[in-house]
Every structure is written in C-alpha cells, then in structure tokens.
C-alpha cells in the first residue's frame, strides 16, 4: 500500500530574524512547520547587526516604541501590542541568554556577540525538532493546481482540505504547504541572502511592491573636515534636518562617525531615514516635487551644514525602505488580502524603523502575529485537534 504524503502545515521561507522567531513560535504552539533558508546558515544578517553585537530590541513602553517608528505605526501597532519589547526581553531570558541593558534602553546579549542570539534560536529549533533546510533557495511558489497537476487529483485534494495549498519549488524538490509565511527580508546586504525573493513571490501573486530606498545608511560628502577624520567616532554628536524656511524638521543626538566617503553613525542614519520618508510623503502629495533639505551635523568642535547629501546605495543599508505594500496585508493577522493562507513577517513588507532595536522588534512581533494567525486558522479547520499533524 502506497504511503500518502500530506502537506506541511506551515512553510516559513527565510531564516533570518523573522523566520527564526516564526519557527520558534510555531514550535511553542505545536504547529508543524519547516524553515527554509537560501544561505548555508541561519541568521546571516542578524550576525551583522549593531556591528556584530545584535541590538535586538529596546526596553521602552509599547506606546513609546510605536511613537518612535513613525510611518509604520499604523500597520504594526496591533502586532507590537501583542508582542511588546519587554515580552521579547523576557523570551530571551527564558532561553537563558544573559542580557545587557544600555542606559537608553537598547538591549544586547551580555557577551556582545550576535551569534549568541542566533545560537539560542538554533538550540530551541533543534530541541523542538523543527526541520530546518539551509543552503536551499526557494525558486518559486505556486497555488495548488497551477503546476500542471492532474485535475481530478486536484479536485479530490481540495475536497479533503477545503482550501488551497501551495507548492514551494526548490532546485531539488517541491514541498506542499497549507500555509506559507514569507520572511525573506529586504534587499540590503544581498550577500546575507536578502535578495528580494519574497517580494518577487508576492509580486507574482499580484501584490504591489513599494519601490526600494535605502534606510539607515551613511551619507556622502568629500568635505575634508569630515574625510580627514575617517575612522573617528563622536558619541556626543547631533544631526538636524532643516527645511528651506529654516524650520527644524528632525533633531537627533547620538553617535556621528566620520568615514572616507562621508558620515555615518546612529544620528546620521536616523536623519537619512527621516529624509527618505519625508520625500516619500512629499511625492504622495506632489510627485513632481523634491525639496532640498539642509543637514546640520555637530561632532567634536565642528558644526557643518550641507544641502541635499546623497545616501550610500541600498545594498549597504541597515534596512530597506519599501517592499510588499502593507495596504494589501491584514495588520491583525499578517495574512495577504489577495491570497488566502499567504502570510508575511518582517522587512519583506514596507515597514521600517529607526536604529536601536526597532527593526528586529518589528520582525519578531509580525512573525509572532503571523504564526498565531496560522494556528487560529488551523484550529478553525481541524477543530479541537489543535496539533493537526
């Protein structure tokens, strides 16, 4: 008698921050899943965060967090309230990860090594026996019935499941999944595996993709007052963004670094992100307008002003501004409004926050909400047989 293969309940595509957290939540909720990562190891970009130290969240109130993220607040509010920063901190403590809190609330592993966070996820997934497929790029995702399958078999399958399934294609095999979660990240630092796969899969399903812009990246200047100090870091720096009428639009005190290409550091990164969002809002109101803003930078004994500094390329950015349009995703579930049982988490979507642990927190929180929603859907489908395996 031939064995009958059954689809996995949840395929998580992308083994970065959002994907690892999603798999951990699935393990906790006893939702059978598989985690698929294109690179040879999990968490490649997480290992780079905060210069390899991994500022994974910020110990502040939920409402302060939401106020700080700006434009993304509308979409992520429900997810953050369900999984606030302090819950994330408690979660890592429960995994016996020693933590260190900075005076401003930024949270790091106590040993200052991002690998500690990645290993904690790896240990949890190993102990929970979650299948993890690394070095396994996903080549495409289709709804059941669009890959030339026998129509009678398809009809029978639909009767059994009473809903659509997906075929996840890789180079060497296809995987059938009842639900798919795209957690592939943005398009910055492509060597870590963030190459836009998830956005391309979403686009193939009919989703809009908001054009990419660099977020949290240095800005270029050949001013010798800056470049001659390349390698110097000024912890007490400050950056202002000033409108043509002289009004201060943005003011941030924090680290300013001098580089051979110009300026970087937390204050510069957050100012650059503000400028990108300012122009995006401006373009939504008047596509033919792009106001030249003045950037005032303070570091050491220097107070310098520049007009319209150019950011570094998106491939070098800490985060990607842009991605799958959030108006086509349900913020209460992270499920596609266009394709049932297709979910999103993290930077694959058009969400981003300032530097300081905000982006990893949003990745974790949206992943948790997506997996919780999958669990709710499975319970509705299978009744009290919650483990449905």
Image (cartoon, rainbow, N blue to C red):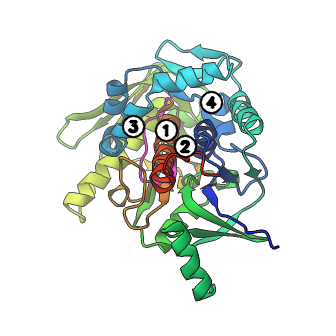
Q: Is residue 167 above or below residue 71?
A: below
Report the front residue among 253 and 284.
284
| Closer to the eye: label 3 or 2 | 2
Instruction: Report the side of 235 relative to 252 (left or right).
Output: right
Mark earlier in primary sequence (1, 3): 3
- Find out whether the residues at labels 2 and 1 contact each other: C-beta distance under 8 Å: yes
Residue 352 is a magenta residue = yes
**Percent from the top left, x then y, of residue 70?**
32, 38
- Res 318 label: 2
- The image quarter containing residue 16 is top right
Mark 3 lies on residue: 271
Q: What secondary structure is the stretch in magenta mostly built from?
A: loop
Residue 252, position in %: x, y? 37, 27
- Label 2 SS: loop
Q: Which residues are magenta?
A: 344-356
45 versus 137 height, above or below: above
- For residue 54, the mark is 4
For marks 3 and 4, the one nearer the N-term is 4
Could one spot residue 195 in this view of the protein?
yes
């Amino acid at each position: 008698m031939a064995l009958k293969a059954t689809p996995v309940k949840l395929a998580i595509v992308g083994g970065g921050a959002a994907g690892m957290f999603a798999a951990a939540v699935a393990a906790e909720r006893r939702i059978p899943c598989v985690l698929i990562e294109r690179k040879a190891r999990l968490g490649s970009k997480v290992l780079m965060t905060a210069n390899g130290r991994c500022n994974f969240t910020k110990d502040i109130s939920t409402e302060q967090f939401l106020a700080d993220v700006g434009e993304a607040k509308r979409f992520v509010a429900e997810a953050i309230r369900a999984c606030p920063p302090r819950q994330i901190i408690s979660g890592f403590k429960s995994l016996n990860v020693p933590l260190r809190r900075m005076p401003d609330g930024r949270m790091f592993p106590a040993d200052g090594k991002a690998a500690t966070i990645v290993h904690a996820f790896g240990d949890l997934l190993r102990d929970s026996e979650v299948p993890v497929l690394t070095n396994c790029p996903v080549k495409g995702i289709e709804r059941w019935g669009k890959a030339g399958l026998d129509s009678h078999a398809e009809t029978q399958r639909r009767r059994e499941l009473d809903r659509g399934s997906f075929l996840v294609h890789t180079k060497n095999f296809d995987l059938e999944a009842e639900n798919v979660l795209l957690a592939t990240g943005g398009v910055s630092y492509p060597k870590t595996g963030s190459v836009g796969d998830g956005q391309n899969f979403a686009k193939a399903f009919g989703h809009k993709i908001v054009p990419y812009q660099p977020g949290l990246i240095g800005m270029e200047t050949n001013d010798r007052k800056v470049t001659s100090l390349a390698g110097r870091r000024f912890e007490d720096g400050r950056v202002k963004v000033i409108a043509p009428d002289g009004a201060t639009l943005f003011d941030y005190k924090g680290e300013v670094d001098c580089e051979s290409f110009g300026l970087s550091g937390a204050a510069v990164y957050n100012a650059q992100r503000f400028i990108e969002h300012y122009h995006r809002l401006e373009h939504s109101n008047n596509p033919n307008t792009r106001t030249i803003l003045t950037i005032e930078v303070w570091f050491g004994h220097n107070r310098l002003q520049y007009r319209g500094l150019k950011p570094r390329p998106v491939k070098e950015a800490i985060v990607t501004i842009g991605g799958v349009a959030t108006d086509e995703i349900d913020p209460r579930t992270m499920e596609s409004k266009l394709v049932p049982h297709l979910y999103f988490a993290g930077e694959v979507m058009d969400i981003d926050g300032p530097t300081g642990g905000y982006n990893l927190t949003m990745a974790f929180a949206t992943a948790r909400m997506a997996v919780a929603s999958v669990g709710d859907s499975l319970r509705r489908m299978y009744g009290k047989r919650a483990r449905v395996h």
